[in-house]
Image (cartoon, rainbow, N blue to C red):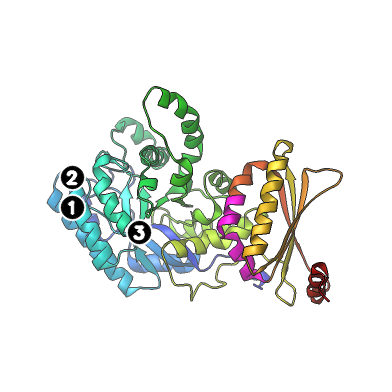
Amino acid sequence: MMSSSLAGMARGVVDVHSHNIPPFYREVIEQLDAAREEGFPLPAWDVDSHLSFMDSAGIECSVLTMPAPQPYFGDGDECRRVVRLYNEYGARLKSAHPDRFRFCASLPLPDVDAAVAEAVYALDTLGADGVKLATNSRGQYLGDEALDPLMEVLNSRNAVIVLHPHRPVPVNDSLVATLPLAVYEYPAETTRALLNLLARNIPVRYPNLKFVVPHCGSFLPLALPRLKALLPALQAKGLIGDIDFKSNLSRLYYDLAGAASPTVIRTMLTITTPDHILYGSDYPYQPASRLAQNLQQLSAALDTDRDLAPYKAMFLSENGARLFSLPSTNREDSVVVPAVAEADTGMLVRISEIEIYPEYRDAYLSAAMEVGATSVREEPGVIAIYPMIQQRDSCQVRILEIYANDEAYRHHLTTPHFITYKQGTLHMVKSLDLVDMIPMNPAAMPAIFLKMKGDK
């Protein structure tokens, strides 16, 4: 059990959204007078400062990507040169700091053939941990049919694709001069590219790819319901084909860079599941002290949120580590998680107090019964998940949960049957209160279960 003095502190965090800005990249961009192309100057960056920020914030490992702008200004040879330098720099950085840095390769788009060749080199030879793709490369948007050969190559390598917004094409220069791209156009641009991906079913057609969506899902939680509502009318006019929303969305992950809070995370959970939410800092685009403070505030907010507290370690560390296949030797117990009732035997006991909207009562009870039975049957560490309803109010559900230990509980949160249950019932739940219990006589538990089975 962690000391109370550590409450709210984050350690062992995996940061999947951070940028490195090597001197040669800055030099090229400044020579082309493009340092402010994105409406925001390139911030200062060096390795030692990045490591210092990570240490101050409690970040164990950062996944690095090239920032905007894309180094293509009409000269394909120059773009390929800069991209190759960047990728080899990332490989050296990872080699020099193997426990602290991973990197996603940049690609020399919009030249698709060159991008395919660079992806093969970066992933197969340099050991890149994924690729970073701009929402658009000089007007060539993600989902464009021209990019299909690249998707095939990345799919054959089970690649992780980290998305990042770039200056939209076209753009109203006078508008963005007043309101920088990062404020509105970046989330709009990300959403635009994502909808294009979904409309062509790119994640479904290339099922080995995993896409990381930046900035808390951008506007996707708002855009998806609108697209679903409009889809029948669009299809009736022959403007769009079928979209496999469920399968497409199952391959999207989301980072928390930008403005993460419990409220924002709840919005994200309307389109995804807890195992697909990852921490991201967006370093160095805000001062290191501010980013470290933001992370600690998020950590503390998650500690006190009964609904989200069980997922804190997943959001801040475990999901990112799993996605990028990071070793777990230094991460065990490193992210402070909310205190869960734990007897001397290590057993965890909890009562979930849930109120269901009346119109969903039957559907919820069916789902709760199914996930409880599946969990007890298939998970050795789940001793009991026992749903009950109050006699006086059948919308008041109580679930007795007993786990062999904390590890069994945390594993339960990642199982497909639990994630399906959680995502499928979010809209049915009016309120949820997780009440951790301390068994007064844990030694009596085995006898109770033996008696229930009829054993002597």
Label whose residue precedes the other's in the sequence (3 or 2): 2
In the image, residue 6 sits, relative to residue 268, either above or below, namely below
Give 403 or 449, whichever is nearer the viewer: 449
Majority secondary structure in the magenta region: helix
Circle 2 crowding by C-alpha within 10 Å: few under 14, some 14–19, many from 20? few
Give 226 or 6, whichever is nearer the viewer: 226
Report helix, strand or loop for mark 3. Answer: loop
Q: Amino acid at mark 3?
A: Asn
Q: Name the residue beneath numbered marker 1.
A: 114
Give me the C-alpha separation between circle 1 and circle 2.
Answer: 15 Å
Q: Dividing the picture into quarters, in which one does residue 20 lie?
A: bottom left
In the image, residue 331 sits, relative to residue 114, either above or below, namely below
Report helix, strand or loop for mark 1. Answer: helix
Circle 3 crowding by C-alpha within 10 Å: few under 14, some 14–19, many from 20? some
Q: Amino acid at mark 1?
A: Ala
Give me the C-alpha separation between circle 3 and circle 2.
Answer: 30 Å
Residue depth check, mark 1 versus mark 2: number of the one nearer the observer: 1
Q: Is residue 129 magenta?
A: no
Tell me which segment is drawn in magenta: 405-421
Q: Name the residue beneath numbered marker 3.
A: 158
Residue 365: % across, % down:
71, 47
Circle 1 crowding by C-alpha within 10 Å: few under 14, some 14–19, many from 20? some
Label whose residue precedes the other's in the sequence (3 or 1): 1
Q: Name the residue beneath numbered marker 2.
A: 73
Number of numbered tags placed on the structure image: 3
Q: Is residue 345 shown to the viewer in this render?
A: yes
Residue 302: % across, % down:
61, 56
In the image: residue 197, left or right of residue 69: right
Q: Is residue 7 shown to the viewer in this render?
A: no
